[in-house]
Image: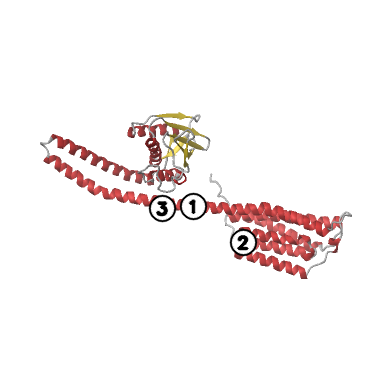
Amino acid sequence: MHQPLPLSTPNLNLIRLTIARGISWTGFLGAIIFGIEVIGFQLHVLPIITTIVLMGLINVATWWRLGQPRAVTDTEYVIHLLFDIIGLTVVFYFTGGSTNPVVMYYLVPITIAAATLSWRHTLIIAIAAILAYTFLMLFYEPLPELRDTIFGTAVSLHVLGMWLTFGLCTVLVTFFIYKMAHALRHRDSSLSRTREAVLRNEQILAVASQAAGTAHELGTPLATMAVLLSEMREDAKDNALLQEDIALLKGQVESCKKHLRALVANAERHHADKPQYYDLVQWFEKVVQHWLVIRPDVTYQLNVAGKRQAQIAVDTTLEQALMNLLNNAADANPDDIELQLDWSEEEVVIDIRDHGPGIPLEIAHQLGDTFVSTKSKGMGIGLFLTHSTINRFGGGVRLYNHEDGGTLTEVRLPRASERA
C-alpha cells in the first residue's frame, strides 16, 4: 500500500488559512447574532448573513479542492485572500464601516500574505485592504449603538469590540502565522539538504568516473607486465632466486587484474540487482570474519543487545562501507575493538568503538561531507563514500569522541520487514 505524499508548503498554508477563516467568520456570526438579539442592533440582516454563508461555502469548496492532487499556486492563494477582503468589506459596510472596531481585522490577511507570499503578491493584498478601508471611510451604514456603554460600565461597545478584535488577531497571528513561517523555514531547510545531497552525488560521480577510467587505463599496463614477466621467467630458467622474484611479481600482477575485474563486475551487478535481505547478526559476523582475514592483528569483542531476529537489506557496497569503518577503527588502535548490534522496530544500530586518539574537534563536523580524513596520510575518500553508501540505504553515520577515550562510530540503518 502506497503512503500518501506529504503536503507541499502552499497546500499546508491554504489549510491553515481555511481554518483561520472558519474561526473568524464563526466569530463574526456569533457577534452579529449577539448584537441583534441581546444589544438590539438594527442591521440589514439578509446581505450580512448571505455573505457569511457564501464565505462558509467557499471554505467547504476549499476543503474539497485541497483533496485534489493539483498543487496550490501563489495566484490561487492570493485569490483566497482577496475573497476574504471582499467578504469583510461587505460585512463592515452594513455594520458601521470604518467606525466598526473589527475593521482592524484587515491586518490579518495582510500579515498572512507577508509571511507566505512574494512581495508582489503581498503588495496586491496590502493595496486591496487599503482601498477597502478607504472605501469604508466614505461609504457605510452607520451603527449608532457602538457608542453605547455596556452593562452600565464606562466601557463602550466600540472599545469592547476593539479589545475582542485585538484578542482574535493576536491568537490568529501568534498561532497560524507562526505555523506558516515554520513551514517555510522547514521548506528552506529541506531545499538546503537537497542541494547538499546533489553536490555530494556530483562528488561521488566524479570519484566513480575517475575510478572507472583508472581501472580501464590500468588494464593495458598490467597485461603488458604479465607478458614481460612470462618472457623474463623463460630467460631466467637457470636462476632459481630470480625465478621466485618473478613468480612473486607475476602473482601480484594477477592479483591486481583480479581486483580490477571484480571491481567492474560489482559495479555492473550493483546497477542490475536489487538489495538482498539477510539476518543482521549472521551478515555482520560474515563481514567481521572477512575483516579479520585482512586484519589478523585485530582483537575484538562482539555484543548482540537486540532480542529475537532482525533483517536488513544489503549489497556489496554496504559491506564495503562497514569494512571501511572497521578498518578505520583498526588503524586507530587494533586492540580490543568493541562491536555492538542493537535494533528496534524501525532501525538497527551498529556501534564500533576503538581505543585510539579520537577525532580532532576541528574536523569532527566535516567528516563524511567532504574529503576530510582522520589519518595523517589519508584523503578522506573512503569515509566520504561510506557516508554516501549508508545514506543511500536510508541510514546515517555519526562519529563521537567517547567519554572514556577513543572513537565511537554509530551506524543506523532501516530495519527490513520480516519476510515469510
**Closer to the N terminus: mark 1 or mark 3?**
1
Most extreme residue toward the left, as rendered? 238
- Looking at the image, the residue that sits furthest to the bottom is 138
Crowding near pointer 2: few (<14 within 10 Å), some, many (20+)? few
- Tell me the kind of residue under disc 3: Glu
On the question of residue 68 being in view, the answer is no
Q: Nearer the viewer, residue 303 or 8?
A: 303
Question: Which label sits on residue 202?
Answer: 3
Question: Residue 19 vs residue 396: left or right?
Answer: right
User: Which of the two discs, 2 and 1, sits closer to the camera?
Assistant: 1
Residue beneath label 2, please?
76
- Give the alpha-carbon distance from disc 3 to disc 2, as whole Å: 37 Å
Earlier-in-chain disc, 2 versus 1? 2
Seen from the viewer's position, the closer of residues 85 and 385 is: 385
Callout 2 secondary element: helix
Establish if 34 lies above or below 319.
Answer: below
Tell me, yes or no, whether the two marked residues, 1 and 3, touch with CB atoms within 8 Å: no
Q: State how far apart marks 2 and 1 are (Cα).
A: 27 Å
Q: Residues within 10 Å of mark 1 (few under 14, many from 20)?
A: few
Picture layout, residue 280 above or below residue 218: above
Q: Nearer the viewer, mark 3 or mark 2?
A: 3
Q: Amino acid at mark 2?
A: Glu
Residue at (33%, 32%) from the top-left corner?
293
Q: Please state the horizontal and vertical placement of residue 168, each as a whole percent of the image.
A: 73, 54
Q: Position of residue 107 (x, y in %)?
A: 70, 60
**In the rendering, which numbered label is found on residue 194?**
1
Residue 397 image position (x, y, % from top left) = 46, 41
Which residue is at the front of the view, 33 or 61?
33
Name the amino acid type tagged 1: Thr
Looking at the image, can residue 320 be seen? yes
Looking at the image, the residue that sits furthest to the right is: 152
**Residue found 74% across the figure and 58% down from its top:** 53
